[in-house]
């Protein structure tokens, strides 16, 4: 039976089915585990060596090391076992032990070419030729392209020789370099590779770091489901050795990802855990951010009362910390809640306070933010019927957006409706047109339905009945696709 399993394993290996081959060799070992004859020992030696080779191919040096140790117990002069154990040690980053094995191999087989190449690689590593100091300097100086190329070369060389720990670190740094270049898909590929290598190394903390980086990239890509999967794997791996601050950040990221998926209960559960840890540790900045994230989840779920309480708490904490930019952001969020509640005068006051805070900041693009807040004040004034105050501000805002190209269709819609209420029809029409263009670009079918309906209403008010009817028909067609706002359209 053992011989048949071994032969089947060899066939699988030749076909590139490494995992299937490994299972065959393991079954063969089970079949001869009690066979103390010379033939049984030879079969066990051969299967341990083959299993080690499979595990190295699968980038699992820890398992390969165990198989080589078992093989060397049977035959301490087995050169294949020495070579593969040396590669396993290289994979685990234990270079001195790797050097001992490869030196012993070359004593037994001085002309072994693979052994010579491995010995040369290990010597270079021990001399410091494979460290990341130069690459880290390139990253810190902003030479991201050269750093990425260096890291790719290191990873490729390390993977070829089986230096999986070196390859893991190279992929980690390379992923960060790709993020800095905004090449997010490439960054995700690097971090996935890093996670896989860390798992093969049996390095739990390294795997958690890889998953954390991967989750962040998925968040930036808008792939919230994949981000949640990464963070959930990390939560499962948390133990007594995991720092409380890491657990705090982990639950915070998980809560943000759940919110992006619209799973508000799970979001609040994770964010509350994060917030409680921050409070217990006395980490004021994390506490402030925690309250802000909790408030954002309440806001998106429609719980405006609790959103307002949490935003006010985060504002007070950021005020204690002296973070003016964060204070202005929280004031604006408070104003948005009040605007949603229809409390326009209070919203105007909060937007005004946010504007005054920003005027005291010495940061770039502050005037652009102040102009945007002026626009929000104008929208609230329009809702209150304060046409004379609102019209100049909103017209200026609409003109600026037309020049810059508005990208946020929701705010374009609000601006368009506000201008329409003041009979600034041409400006309103341009806003709704930009709203429609952005929704088409992002394939937001519901947004397209709203934009077509808004344009239809505007054209109808201008007496253009036939074009308005066409817009309403297009709105209905989009609404039917989204199965969402059919009745309204």
Image (cartoon, rainbow, N blue to C red):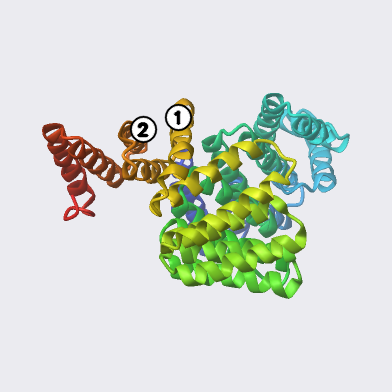
Q: Is residue 89 visible?
A: yes
- Residue 125 is left or right of residue 421, and the answer is right
Query: Of 489 and 112, which appears nearest the observer?
Result: 489
Q: Residue furthest front?
A: 388
Say which residue appears at 49% left-offset and 50% top-offset.
19
Q: Is residue 1 visible?
A: no
Say which residue appears at 42% left-offset and 57% top-offset.
261
From the top left corner, tell me how far across and down residue 467 is, in percent: 15, 32
Say which residue appears at 49% left-offset and 57% top-offset.
336
Query: Of 89 and 434, which appears nearest the observer?
Result: 434
From the top left corner, tell me how far across and down residue 119 is, in percent: 80, 34
Tag 2 near tag 1, CB within 8 Å: yes
Q: Residue furthest right?
A: 127
Q: Quadrant of residue 178?
A: top right
Query: Of 7 and 366, which appears nearest the observer?
Result: 366
Q: CA distance from mark 2 to mark 1?
A: 8 Å
Query: Of 169 and 440, which appears nearest the observer?
Result: 440
Q: Which residue is mark 2?
A: 427
Dot 2 or dot 1: first in sequence order is 1
- Is disc 2 placed on a helix, strand or loop? helix
Q: Which mark is residue 399?
A: 1
Q: Quadrant of the N terminus?
A: bottom left
Q: Quadrant of residue 250?
A: bottom right
- Residue 177 is left or right of residue 110, and the answer is left
Give neighbour class at mark 2: few <14, some 14-19, many 20+ (Cα, 10 Å).
many
From the top left corner, tell me how far across and down residue 278 is, in percent: 69, 69
Say which residue appears at 43% left-offset and 39% top-offset.
391
């Amino acid at each position: 039976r053992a011989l048949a399993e071994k032969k089947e394993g060899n066939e699988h290996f030749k076909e590139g089915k490494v995992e299937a081959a490994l299972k065959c060799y393991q079954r063969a070992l089970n079949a001869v585990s009690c066979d103390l004859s010379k033939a049984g020992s030879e079969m066990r030696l051969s299967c341990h060596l083959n299993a080690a080779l499979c595990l190295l191919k699968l980038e699992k040096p820890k398992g390969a090391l165990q198989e080589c140790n078992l093989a060397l117990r049977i035959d301490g002069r087995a050169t294949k076992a020495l070579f593969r154990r040396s590669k396993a040690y290289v994979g685990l980053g234990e270079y001195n032990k790797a050097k001992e094995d490869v030196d012993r191999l070359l004593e037994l087989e001085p002309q072994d070419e693979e052994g010579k190449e491995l010995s040369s690689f290990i010597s270079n590593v021990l001399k410091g030729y494979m460290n990341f100091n130069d690459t880290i300097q390139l990253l810190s100086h902003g030479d991201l392209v050269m750093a990425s190329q260096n890291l790719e070369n290191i990873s490729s060389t390390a993977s070829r020789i089986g230096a999986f720990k070196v390859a893991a670190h190279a992929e980690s740094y390379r992923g960060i370099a790709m993020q800095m270049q905004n090449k997010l898909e490439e960054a995700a590929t690097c971090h996935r590779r890093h996670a896989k290598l860390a798992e093969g190394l049996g390095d739990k903390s390294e795997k958690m770091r890889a998953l954390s980086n991967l989750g962040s990239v998925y968040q930036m890509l808008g792939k919230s489901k994949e981000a949640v999967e990464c963070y959930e794997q990390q939560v499962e791996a948390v133990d007594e050795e995991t720092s409380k601050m890491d657990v705090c950040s982990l639950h915070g990221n998980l809560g943000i990802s759940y919110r992006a998926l619209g799973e508000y209960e799970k979001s609040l559960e994770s964010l509350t855990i994060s917030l409680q840890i921050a409070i217990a540790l006395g980490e004021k900045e994390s506490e402030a951010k925690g309250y802000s994230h909790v408030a954002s989840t309440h806001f998106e779920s429609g719980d405006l009362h609790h959103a307002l309480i949490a935003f006010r708490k985060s504002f007070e904490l950021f005020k204690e910390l002296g973070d003016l930019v964060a204070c202005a952001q929280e004031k604006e969020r408070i104003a948005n809640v009040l605007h949603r509640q229809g409390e326009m005068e209070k919203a105007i006051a909060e937007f005004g306070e946010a504007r005054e805070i920003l005027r005291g900041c010495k940061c770039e693009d502050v005037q652009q933010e102040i102009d945007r807040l002026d626009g929000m004040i104008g929208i609230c004034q329009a809702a209150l019927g304060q046409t004379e105050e609102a019209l100049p501000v909103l017209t200026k805002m609409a003109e600026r957006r037309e020049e810059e190209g508005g990208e946020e269709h929701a705010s374009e819609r609000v601006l368009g409706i506000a201008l329409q209420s003041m009979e600034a029809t041409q400006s309103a029409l341009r806003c709704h047109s930009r709203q429609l263009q952005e929704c088409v670009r992002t394939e937001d079918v519901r947004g397209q339905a709203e934009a077509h309906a808004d344009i239809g209403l505007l054209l109808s008010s201008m007496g253009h009945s036939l074009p308005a009817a066409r817009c309403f028909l297009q709105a209905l067609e989009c609404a039917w696709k989204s199965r969402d706002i059919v009745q309204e359209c």
